[in-house]
Image (cartoon, grey):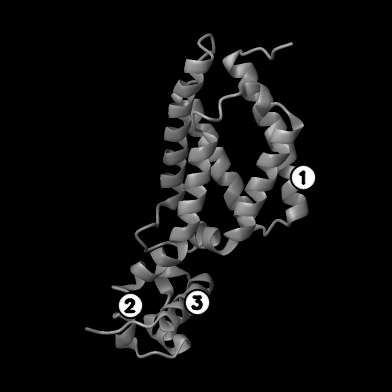
């Protein structure tokens, strides 16, 4: 039985990250990764089955955290529309998005722009579909708490989800600073919360 060494595993991931960011998944070289990590090419396969396995290991923490955050935001515990309209909540949402993007800028860049040829090559479409499904489910949760609320069309849900994915990709593509992200998300969340309230026709309590 081979004994796997954590420092070699981490070295492979670190070198592979640089290779994927520079060349993209499709053109990334396993030989270059091996050389950069100072391990034999054959030794890489003791740690990872193939190049795709390495790529997924790099981006999976980002996927797990982003999906978990989205699920929390669209859960049963987050249905108080009065709270959504407060400055405190909107600022909290702004900072949460900034933290996620700042933490996973490189992983998101890989997912949006460097994943061609990998098993996650359709990330943009997959992420859009995921957001659409989450929003559809959340609409039903909101309906339970606000029975008089109006339902929004499925195509609108899908289009809004695609817009958010596009926004994220543009922030990553243009390397938007924290300051500019904060300015944008403050505008976006004010726009979004007011828009949702208008669409589902739920009046604020006086």
Q: Quadrant of residue 163?
A: top right
Q: Which numbered dot is residue 183? A: 1
Q: Quadrant of residue 84?
A: top right
Q: CA distance from mark 1 to mark 3?
A: 33 Å
Residue for badge 2: 47
Q: Which numbered dot is residue 12? A: none
Q: CA distance from mark 2 to mark 3?
A: 14 Å
Which SS class for mark 1? helix
Which SS class for mark 2? loop
At a point 42% along the width and 74% down the height, the residue shown is 27
Rendered-image quadrant of the C terminus: top right
Q: Earlier in the sequence, mark 2 or mark 3?
A: 3
Q: Earlier in the sequence, mark 1 or mark 3?
A: 3
Q: Earlier in the sequence, mark 2 or mark 1?
A: 2
Rendered-image quadrant of the N terminus: bottom left
How busy is the neighbourhood of tag 1: few (under 14 within 10 Å), some, or many (20 plus)? few
Residue mark closest to the camera, 1 vs 3: 3
Q: Quadrant of residue 183?
A: top right
Mark 1 and mark 3 in contact? Answer it, CB < 8 Å.
no
Task: Tell which of 114 and 197 is nearer to you.
Answer: 197
How busy is the neighbourhood of tag 3: few (under 14 within 10 Å), some, or many (20 plus)? some
How busy is the neighbourhood of tag 2: few (under 14 within 10 Å), some, or many (20 plus)? some
Task: Tell which of 27 and 175 is nearer to you.
Answer: 175
At a point 37% along the width and 63% down the height, the residue shown is 118
Q: CA distance from mark 2 to mark 1?
A: 43 Å
Q: Name, please, the residue furthest toward the top.
A: 148
**Could you say where residue 95 lies in the image, as x and y percent from the top left?**
69, 47
Q: Which numbered dot is residue 14? A: 3
Residue mark closest to the camera, 2 vs 1: 2
């Amino acid at each position: 039985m081979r004994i796997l060494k954590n420092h070699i595993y981490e070295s492979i991931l670190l070198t592979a990250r640089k290779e994927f960011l520079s060349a993209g998944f499709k053109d990334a070289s396993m030989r270059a990764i091996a050389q950069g990590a100072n391990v034999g090419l054959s030794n890489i396969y003791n740690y990872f089955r193939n190049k795709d396995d390495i790529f997924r290991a790099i981006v999976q923490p980002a996927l797990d955290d982003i999906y978990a955050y989205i699920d929390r935001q669209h859960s049963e515990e987050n249905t108080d529309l009065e709270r959504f309209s407060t400055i405190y909540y909107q600022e909290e949402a702004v900072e949460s998005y900034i933290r996620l993007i700042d933490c996973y800028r490189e992983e998101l860049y890989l997912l949006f722009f460097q994943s061609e040829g990998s098993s996650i090559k359709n990330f943009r479409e997959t992420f859009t579909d995921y957001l659409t499904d989450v929003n559809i489910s959340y609409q039903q949760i909101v309906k339970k708490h606000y029975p008089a609320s109006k339902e929004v069309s499925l195509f609108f849900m899908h289009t809004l989800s695609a817009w958010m994915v596009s926004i994220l990709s543009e922030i990553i593509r243009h390397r938007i600073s924290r300051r500019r992200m904060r300015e944008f998300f403050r505008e976006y969340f004010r726009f979004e919360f007011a828009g949702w309230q208008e669409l589902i026709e739920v009046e604020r309590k006086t």
